[in-house]
Amino acid sequence: METLSGQKKAFWYNNVMGQTAQKNNFYLILSDLGLLIFAGLIFYYWNDNPELAFGQIQFILFILLITLFTRSVSTRYGIGMYGRGLFLGTGITLLIGAGYRALGFDPGGSFFASSLFFPTLEEILKLFPVLLSAYLLYRKNPDQQWNISDWVMLGMMSGTAFGMSEDYYREGYLGEHFGPHFGNVYLFPDATGFSYGNGNEAMGYIGHGAATAFITLAIGLGFYCSKKFNKKPLCWQIPLLAFIWVTFEHMANNAGDESDLMLKIFGLLGGGHLTPWLFLILLLGGVGIDAKNFIHAYKTLPKFKKIALFGVEKTKNFVIKKTWPPLSFMKGCFRALRFLNRAAWHYFFKT
Protein backbone atom coordinates (compact mmCIF):
# COMPACT_ATOMS: atom_id res chain seq x y z
CA MET A 1 0.00 0.00 0.00
CA GLU A 2 1.24 3.46 -0.89
CA THR A 3 2.28 5.60 2.08
CA LEU A 4 1.50 9.28 2.53
CA SER A 5 4.11 11.85 1.65
CA GLY A 6 5.26 14.27 4.34
CA GLN A 7 3.10 17.07 2.93
CA LYS A 8 0.00 14.89 2.72
CA LYS A 9 0.61 13.50 6.21
CA ALA A 10 0.86 17.02 7.62
CA PHE A 11 -2.39 17.91 5.89
CA TRP A 12 -4.00 14.78 7.31
CA TYR A 13 -2.87 15.62 10.86
CA ASN A 14 -4.11 19.21 10.64
CA ASN A 15 -7.47 18.53 9.01
CA VAL A 16 -8.47 15.19 10.51
CA MET A 17 -6.64 14.48 13.75
CA GLY A 18 -6.66 18.10 14.84
CA GLN A 19 -10.32 18.86 14.17
CA THR A 20 -12.72 19.60 17.01
CA ALA A 21 -16.43 18.95 17.23
CA GLN A 22 -18.51 21.62 15.55
CA LYS A 23 -21.89 22.09 17.19
CA ASN A 24 -24.70 23.42 15.05
CA ASN A 25 -27.71 24.76 16.94
CA PHE A 26 -30.19 23.58 14.31
CA TYR A 27 -28.69 20.07 14.37
CA LEU A 28 -28.88 19.96 18.19
CA ILE A 29 -32.49 21.13 18.20
CA LEU A 30 -33.42 18.55 15.57
CA SER A 31 -31.63 15.82 17.52
CA ASP A 32 -33.41 16.68 20.77
CA LEU A 33 -36.76 17.04 19.03
CA GLY A 34 -36.26 13.65 17.38
CA LEU A 35 -35.41 12.15 20.77
CA LEU A 36 -38.56 13.58 22.34
CA ILE A 37 -40.76 12.27 19.53
CA PHE A 38 -39.02 8.90 19.63
CA ALA A 39 -39.57 8.66 23.40
CA GLY A 40 -43.21 9.68 22.94
CA LEU A 41 -43.84 7.03 20.28
CA ILE A 42 -42.18 4.34 22.37
CA PHE A 43 -44.29 5.35 25.40
CA TYR A 44 -47.43 5.24 23.26
CA TYR A 45 -46.61 1.84 21.78
CA TRP A 46 -45.58 0.42 25.14
CA ASN A 47 -49.00 1.23 26.56
CA ASP A 48 -51.00 0.34 23.47
CA ASN A 49 -48.92 -2.46 21.96
CA PRO A 50 -45.83 -3.50 23.95
CA GLU A 51 -44.87 -6.16 21.39
CA LEU A 52 -44.22 -3.56 18.68
CA ALA A 53 -42.43 -1.22 21.10
CA PHE A 54 -40.14 -3.99 22.33
CA GLY A 55 -39.35 -5.03 18.76
CA GLN A 56 -38.39 -1.49 17.71
CA ILE A 57 -36.23 -0.91 20.80
CA GLN A 58 -34.58 -4.29 20.36
CA PHE A 59 -33.60 -3.66 16.74
CA ILE A 60 -32.35 -0.13 17.45
CA LEU A 61 -30.20 -1.37 20.35
CA PHE A 62 -28.88 -4.24 18.24
CA ILE A 63 -27.53 -1.89 15.56
CA LEU A 64 -26.31 0.73 18.06
CA LEU A 65 -24.40 -1.82 20.11
CA ILE A 66 -22.84 -3.77 17.24
CA THR A 67 -21.48 -0.53 15.75
CA LEU A 68 -20.66 1.14 19.09
CA PHE A 69 -16.86 0.90 18.84
CA THR A 70 -16.51 1.40 15.08
CA ARG A 71 -18.77 4.41 14.40
CA SER A 72 -17.47 7.94 13.80
CA VAL A 73 -20.83 9.60 14.54
CA SER A 74 -22.58 9.73 17.91
CA THR A 75 -25.87 8.19 18.95
CA ARG A 76 -27.16 11.74 19.36
CA TYR A 77 -26.43 12.39 15.70
CA GLY A 78 -28.35 9.19 14.96
CA ILE A 79 -31.33 10.52 16.91
CA GLY A 80 -31.10 13.62 14.73
CA MET A 81 -31.33 11.35 11.68
CA TYR A 82 -34.39 9.74 13.25
CA GLY A 83 -35.95 13.21 13.38
CA ARG A 84 -35.06 13.85 9.74
CA GLY A 85 -36.51 10.50 8.74
CA LEU A 86 -39.70 11.39 10.55
CA PHE A 87 -40.10 14.88 9.10
CA LEU A 88 -38.69 14.30 5.62
CA GLY A 89 -39.21 10.61 4.81
CA THR A 90 -42.54 10.11 6.56
CA GLY A 91 -43.74 13.68 6.04
CA ILE A 92 -43.23 13.71 2.26
CA THR A 93 -44.84 10.26 1.95
CA LEU A 94 -47.93 11.48 3.81
CA LEU A 95 -48.12 14.59 1.62
CA ILE A 96 -47.91 12.52 -1.57
CA GLY A 97 -50.51 10.11 -0.21
CA ALA A 98 -52.81 13.03 0.61
CA GLY A 99 -52.32 14.43 -2.89
CA TYR A 100 -53.05 11.01 -4.36
CA ARG A 101 -56.34 10.88 -2.47
CA ALA A 102 -57.17 14.48 -3.42
CA LEU A 103 -57.04 13.40 -7.06
CA GLY A 104 -59.67 10.79 -6.33
CA PHE A 105 -57.41 7.73 -6.08
CA ASP A 106 -57.08 5.22 -3.27
CA PRO A 107 -53.41 4.38 -2.41
CA GLY A 108 -54.46 0.84 -1.54
CA GLY A 109 -57.16 0.51 -4.15
CA SER A 110 -55.09 -0.71 -7.07
CA PHE A 111 -52.27 -3.14 -7.72
CA PHE A 112 -50.14 -0.38 -9.26
CA ALA A 113 -50.45 1.93 -6.26
CA SER A 114 -50.15 -0.54 -3.39
CA SER A 115 -47.69 -3.01 -4.90
CA LEU A 116 -45.54 -0.96 -7.29
CA PHE A 117 -45.67 2.81 -6.83
CA PHE A 118 -45.86 3.31 -3.05
CA PRO A 119 -43.35 0.58 -2.05
CA THR A 120 -40.78 2.14 -4.41
CA LEU A 121 -41.62 5.64 -3.21
CA GLU A 122 -41.28 4.63 0.44
CA GLU A 123 -37.86 3.04 -0.07
CA ILE A 124 -36.64 6.19 -1.85
CA LEU A 125 -38.01 8.61 0.75
CA LYS A 126 -36.65 6.60 3.70
CA LEU A 127 -33.24 6.87 2.06
CA PHE A 128 -33.60 10.54 1.17
CA PRO A 129 -32.74 12.08 4.62
CA VAL A 130 -29.54 10.02 4.82
CA LEU A 131 -28.39 10.90 1.30
CA LEU A 132 -29.25 14.57 1.82
CA SER A 133 -27.25 14.68 5.06
CA ALA A 134 -24.31 12.91 3.40
CA TYR A 135 -24.35 15.43 0.55
CA LEU A 136 -24.45 18.43 2.90
CA LEU A 137 -21.62 16.94 4.97
CA TYR A 138 -19.49 16.35 1.88
CA ARG A 139 -20.15 19.85 0.56
CA LYS A 140 -19.13 21.37 3.91
CA ASN A 141 -16.01 19.23 4.41
CA PRO A 142 -15.03 16.50 1.90
CA ASP A 143 -12.59 15.06 4.47
CA GLN A 144 -15.37 14.16 6.94
CA GLN A 145 -17.06 11.12 5.48
CA TRP A 146 -19.03 8.36 7.16
CA ASN A 147 -17.61 4.88 7.43
CA ILE A 148 -19.59 1.66 6.94
CA SER A 149 -20.80 1.50 10.56
CA ASP A 150 -22.08 5.08 10.32
CA TRP A 151 -24.03 4.39 7.15
CA VAL A 152 -25.82 1.36 8.58
CA MET A 153 -26.69 3.09 11.88
CA LEU A 154 -28.02 6.23 10.20
CA GLY A 155 -30.02 4.23 7.66
CA MET A 156 -31.53 2.23 10.50
CA MET A 157 -32.58 5.43 12.29
CA SER A 158 -34.21 6.99 9.22
CA GLY A 159 -36.00 3.78 8.23
CA THR A 160 -37.14 3.05 11.78
CA ALA A 161 -38.72 6.50 12.02
CA PHE A 162 -40.87 5.62 9.02
CA GLY A 163 -41.60 2.15 10.34
CA MET A 164 -42.74 3.40 13.73
CA SER A 165 -45.02 5.93 12.05
CA GLU A 166 -46.60 3.14 10.03
CA ASP A 167 -46.94 1.04 13.17
CA TYR A 168 -49.49 3.58 14.36
CA TYR A 169 -52.04 1.76 12.17
CA ARG A 170 -51.03 -1.73 13.28
CA GLU A 171 -52.28 -3.72 16.25
CA GLY A 172 -49.42 -6.21 16.25
CA TYR A 173 -47.05 -8.13 14.02
CA LEU A 174 -48.61 -9.54 10.88
CA GLY A 175 -47.73 -13.08 9.83
CA GLU A 176 -44.89 -15.30 10.99
CA HIS A 177 -41.43 -14.17 12.10
CA PHE A 178 -38.34 -15.39 10.26
CA GLY A 179 -34.60 -14.74 10.20
CA PRO A 180 -31.77 -15.07 12.79
CA HIS A 181 -33.11 -15.54 16.29
CA PHE A 182 -32.33 -16.76 19.80
CA GLY A 183 -35.39 -18.62 21.01
CA ASN A 184 -38.31 -16.26 20.55
CA VAL A 185 -36.11 -13.17 20.22
CA TYR A 186 -35.53 -12.28 16.55
CA LEU A 187 -32.71 -9.95 15.48
CA PHE A 188 -35.04 -8.48 12.83
CA PRO A 189 -38.44 -8.33 14.58
CA ASP A 190 -40.21 -6.72 11.60
CA ALA A 191 -39.22 -9.58 9.28
CA THR A 192 -42.62 -11.26 9.01
CA GLY A 193 -44.64 -12.86 6.25
CA PHE A 194 -47.35 -15.28 5.14
CA SER A 195 -47.35 -18.68 3.46
CA TYR A 196 -50.33 -17.78 1.20
CA GLY A 197 -51.71 -21.27 1.64
CA ASN A 198 -49.11 -22.90 -0.60
CA GLY A 199 -47.63 -25.05 2.13
CA ASN A 200 -44.26 -23.32 1.93
CA GLU A 201 -42.51 -21.17 4.50
CA ALA A 202 -43.82 -17.69 5.13
CA MET A 203 -42.60 -15.15 2.57
CA GLY A 204 -42.26 -11.53 3.61
CA TYR A 205 -40.37 -8.27 3.97
CA ILE A 206 -37.48 -7.55 6.35
CA GLY A 207 -39.14 -4.36 7.66
CA HIS A 208 -38.70 -0.65 7.04
CA GLY A 209 -35.79 0.05 9.41
CA ALA A 210 -33.79 -2.99 8.35
CA ALA A 211 -34.48 -2.42 4.63
CA THR A 212 -33.10 1.13 4.69
CA ALA A 213 -30.15 0.02 6.83
CA PHE A 214 -29.47 -2.76 4.31
CA ILE A 215 -29.26 -0.20 1.48
CA THR A 216 -27.06 2.24 3.44
CA LEU A 217 -24.84 -0.66 4.51
CA ALA A 218 -24.43 -1.38 0.80
CA ILE A 219 -23.52 2.27 0.21
CA GLY A 220 -20.73 2.06 2.76
CA LEU A 221 -19.50 -1.23 1.29
CA GLY A 222 -19.73 0.27 -2.19
CA PHE A 223 -17.39 3.14 -1.24
CA TYR A 224 -14.99 0.67 0.37
CA CYS A 225 -14.95 -1.75 -2.58
CA SER A 226 -14.55 1.03 -5.13
CA LYS A 227 -11.37 2.16 -3.36
CA LYS A 228 -10.12 -1.31 -2.44
CA PHE A 229 -10.43 -2.73 -5.96
CA ASN A 230 -9.92 0.59 -7.77
CA LYS A 231 -13.28 0.30 -9.57
CA LYS A 232 -15.33 3.47 -9.12
CA PRO A 233 -18.60 2.04 -10.57
CA LEU A 234 -18.85 -0.26 -7.53
CA CYS A 235 -19.70 2.76 -5.36
CA TRP A 236 -23.14 2.94 -7.05
CA GLN A 237 -23.56 -0.60 -8.43
CA ILE A 238 -23.57 -2.32 -5.02
CA PRO A 239 -26.11 0.11 -3.44
CA LEU A 240 -28.32 -0.05 -6.54
CA LEU A 241 -28.41 -3.84 -6.35
CA ALA A 242 -29.34 -3.66 -2.64
CA PHE A 243 -32.05 -1.09 -3.38
CA ILE A 244 -33.58 -3.22 -6.16
CA TRP A 245 -33.43 -6.31 -3.94
CA VAL A 246 -35.31 -4.90 -0.93
CA THR A 247 -37.69 -2.82 -3.06
CA PHE A 248 -38.77 -5.92 -4.98
CA GLU A 249 -39.30 -7.78 -1.71
CA HIS A 250 -41.37 -4.85 -0.46
CA MET A 251 -43.46 -4.89 -3.64
CA ALA A 252 -43.90 -8.67 -3.61
CA ASN A 253 -44.86 -8.61 0.07
CA ASN A 254 -47.54 -5.98 -0.62
CA ALA A 255 -48.79 -7.81 -3.69
CA GLY A 256 -49.14 -11.14 -1.90
CA ASP A 257 -51.06 -13.59 -4.07
CA GLU A 258 -52.41 -10.86 -6.37
CA SER A 259 -49.58 -11.56 -8.83
CA ASP A 260 -48.62 -15.20 -9.45
CA LEU A 261 -45.53 -14.15 -11.44
CA MET A 262 -44.23 -11.83 -8.71
CA LEU A 263 -44.94 -14.43 -6.04
CA LYS A 264 -43.08 -17.10 -8.04
CA ILE A 265 -40.03 -14.89 -8.55
CA PHE A 266 -40.17 -13.91 -4.88
CA GLY A 267 -40.11 -17.58 -3.91
CA LEU A 268 -37.13 -18.27 -6.18
CA LEU A 269 -35.22 -15.43 -4.51
CA GLY A 270 -35.79 -16.90 -1.06
CA GLY A 271 -39.12 -15.31 -0.17
CA GLY A 272 -37.40 -12.76 2.06
CA HIS A 273 -35.68 -15.40 4.21
CA LEU A 274 -32.27 -14.79 2.65
CA THR A 275 -32.23 -11.04 3.32
CA PRO A 276 -31.92 -11.03 7.16
CA TRP A 277 -29.05 -13.52 7.00
CA LEU A 278 -27.37 -11.61 4.16
CA PHE A 279 -27.78 -8.40 6.17
CA LEU A 280 -26.20 -9.98 9.25
CA ILE A 281 -23.22 -11.37 7.30
CA LEU A 282 -22.58 -8.06 5.50
CA LEU A 283 -23.03 -6.11 8.75
CA LEU A 284 -20.42 -8.18 10.54
CA GLY A 285 -18.14 -7.84 7.52
CA GLY A 286 -18.63 -4.06 7.42
CA VAL A 287 -17.90 -3.64 11.13
CA GLY A 288 -14.85 -5.87 10.65
CA ILE A 289 -13.61 -3.64 7.81
CA ASP A 290 -13.92 -0.54 9.99
CA ALA A 291 -12.03 -2.30 12.77
CA LYS A 292 -9.34 -3.39 10.30
CA ASN A 293 -8.91 0.19 9.06
CA PHE A 294 -8.55 1.32 12.68
CA ILE A 295 -5.83 -1.27 13.33
CA HIS A 296 -3.99 -0.30 10.14
CA ALA A 297 -3.98 3.39 11.12
CA TYR A 298 -2.89 2.44 14.65
CA LYS A 299 0.12 0.54 13.33
CA THR A 300 1.05 3.14 10.72
CA LEU A 301 0.49 6.57 12.27
CA PRO A 302 2.39 7.48 15.47
CA LYS A 303 0.01 10.27 16.51
CA PHE A 304 -3.02 8.03 15.99
CA LYS A 305 -1.38 5.37 18.19
CA LYS A 306 -0.48 7.96 20.84
CA ILE A 307 -4.08 9.17 21.15
CA ALA A 308 -5.42 5.60 21.30
CA LEU A 309 -2.91 4.52 23.97
CA PHE A 310 -3.65 7.58 26.09
CA GLY A 311 -7.26 6.48 26.50
CA VAL A 312 -6.22 2.88 27.19
CA GLU A 313 -3.74 3.91 29.90
CA LYS A 314 -6.28 6.16 31.59
CA THR A 315 -8.83 3.35 31.55
CA LYS A 316 -6.29 0.93 33.05
CA ASN A 317 -5.78 3.31 35.97
CA PHE A 318 -9.46 3.10 36.86
CA VAL A 319 -9.39 -0.70 36.55
CA ILE A 320 -6.34 -0.95 38.82
CA LYS A 321 -7.97 1.32 41.39
CA LYS A 322 -11.21 -0.66 41.03
CA THR A 323 -13.19 2.54 40.62
CA TRP A 324 -15.85 3.34 38.06
CA PRO A 325 -14.65 6.09 35.70
CA PRO A 326 -16.67 9.33 35.78
CA LEU A 327 -19.27 9.88 33.09
CA SER A 328 -17.33 12.81 31.64
CA PHE A 329 -14.28 10.58 31.15
CA MET A 330 -16.34 7.86 29.44
CA LYS A 331 -17.96 10.41 27.12
CA GLY A 332 -14.54 11.81 26.32
CA CYS A 333 -13.20 8.34 25.48
CA PHE A 334 -16.07 7.61 23.09
CA ARG A 335 -15.71 11.05 21.52
CA ALA A 336 -12.00 10.40 20.94
CA LEU A 337 -12.78 6.93 19.58
CA ARG A 338 -15.24 8.40 17.08
CA PHE A 339 -12.58 10.86 15.88
CA LEU A 340 -10.09 8.02 15.52
CA ASN A 341 -12.59 5.93 13.55
CA ARG A 342 -13.22 8.87 11.24
CA ALA A 343 -9.48 9.40 10.85
CA ALA A 344 -8.93 5.71 10.07
CA TRP A 345 -11.59 5.80 7.34
CA HIS A 346 -10.09 8.98 5.91
CA TYR A 347 -6.60 7.49 5.99
CA PHE A 348 -7.82 4.41 4.10
CA PHE A 349 -9.02 6.60 1.25
CA LYS A 350 -5.85 8.73 1.19
CA THR A 351 -3.39 5.83 0.93
Image (cartoon, rainbow, N blue to C red):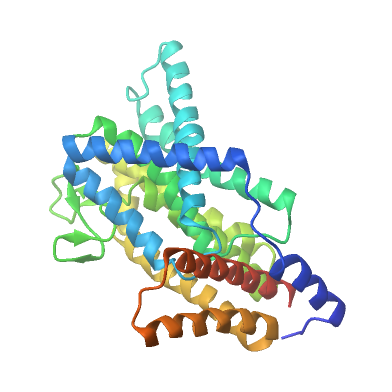
Q: Residue furthest right?
A: 7
Q: Is residue 174 left or right of residue 228?
A: left
Q: Is residue 31 visible?
A: yes
Q: As rendered, which of 306 and 106 lies closer to the eye?
A: 306
- Residue 17 falls left or right of residue 14: left
Instruction: State whether residue 259 appears in this view.
Output: no
Tell me the quadrant of the picture where the C terminus can be found. bottom right
Residue 344, x across and y down, in percent: 63, 74
Task: Say which of 153 and 24 sits in front.
Answer: 24
* Nearest the eye: 293 or 172: 293
Name which residue lies at 50% across and 67% down.
334
Residue 288 to residue 204: above or below: below
Q: Residue at x 33, y 82 (%)?
A: 322
| Residue 101 sits in quarter | top left
Residue 28 at what x, y percent from top left?
55, 43
What residue do we see at 43% from left, 25% from top?
94
Q: Position of residue 108 (x, y in %)?
A: 33, 25
- Residue 237's x, y, as percent? 59, 59
Residue drawn at the location 66% of the way across and 47% of the way down:
135
**Horizontal relation, residue 86 to residue 53: left or right:** right
Q: Is residue 313 above or below residue 254?
A: below
